[in-house]
Amino acid sequence: RSHGNTVDIDKAVAQSGSGSVQGNGHYVHSAHDWSTGDVRFDVTSSKLRLARLEAIQHWRAGTDGDVELNARGELHLAHGELASLDALNSHLALRNASVGEQPFGSAALDAHTAAGSLQVSLAANLRGSQINGSGQWRLADGYPGSGRVTFARINFATIRDVAALSGPAPADLPFVGTVAGSIEVSAPLRKMR
């Protein structure tokens, strides 16, 4: 529904098998430029399966898992690009992820804005290994901030299987073992795209 420089989407639904993504939105654009304006959105998924998403299957056939998405936010566009993130409250979860016959685990990513910053947290279980992360970026020019991810005892064979998701499977490793540690990053989000 459009009126003047305002576009309202009361309800949009995308269906995939028994799963769906639904949402609503509100857009107020500048008088002479549709690509500049303020967006408010609210998106929720229900019973979404990776096995039923064509784009995922095109990327890697046999990928499966249950996806849960809830995202609500406000942002400003300038000439079709993100100019500022004004508010966000989101939760993205992937459960029982697998590729072919290989199980990988589950993960949840939460992001929300508070007190002038974007706060992000990650919790994942990769074949029994715990991965946790958190970060905070200021809602200022360039989005400066930092984050840290820690991981406990990940098997080298699991790392090999994850690496194989982006291309041909690497050769079997001539050794066994585990690795644990942490990764820290301190950089503006704009430069991490």
Image: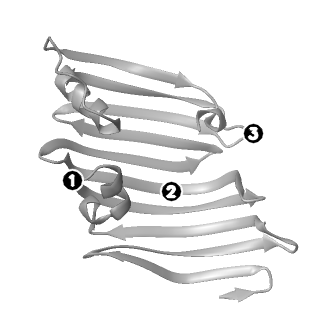
Q: Secondary structure at mark 2?
A: strand
Q: Are marks 3 and 1 in contact (CB under 8 Å)?
A: no
* Colouring style: one colour
Residue at the image position 24 percent from the left and 16 percent from the top: 179
Q: Tag 3: residue type?
A: Asp
Q: Tag 2: residue type?
A: Asn
Residue behind mark 3: 141
Q: Position of residue 98 (x, y in %)?
A: 19, 47
From what the image shows, is residue 92 above or below residue 159? below
Q: Earlier in the sequence, mark 2 or mark 1?
A: 1
Q: Position of residue 139 (x, y in %)?
A: 67, 43
The quarter holding residue 8 reads bottom right
Residue at the image position 42 percent from the left and 40 percent from the top: 121
The quarter holding residue 102 reads top left
Q: Earlier in the sequence, mark 3 or mark 1?
A: 1
Residue behind mark 2: 89
- Name the outermost residue toward the top: 175
Residue behind mark 1: 62
Q: Tag 1: residue type?
A: Gly
Q: Position of residue 189 (x, y in %)?
A: 61, 37
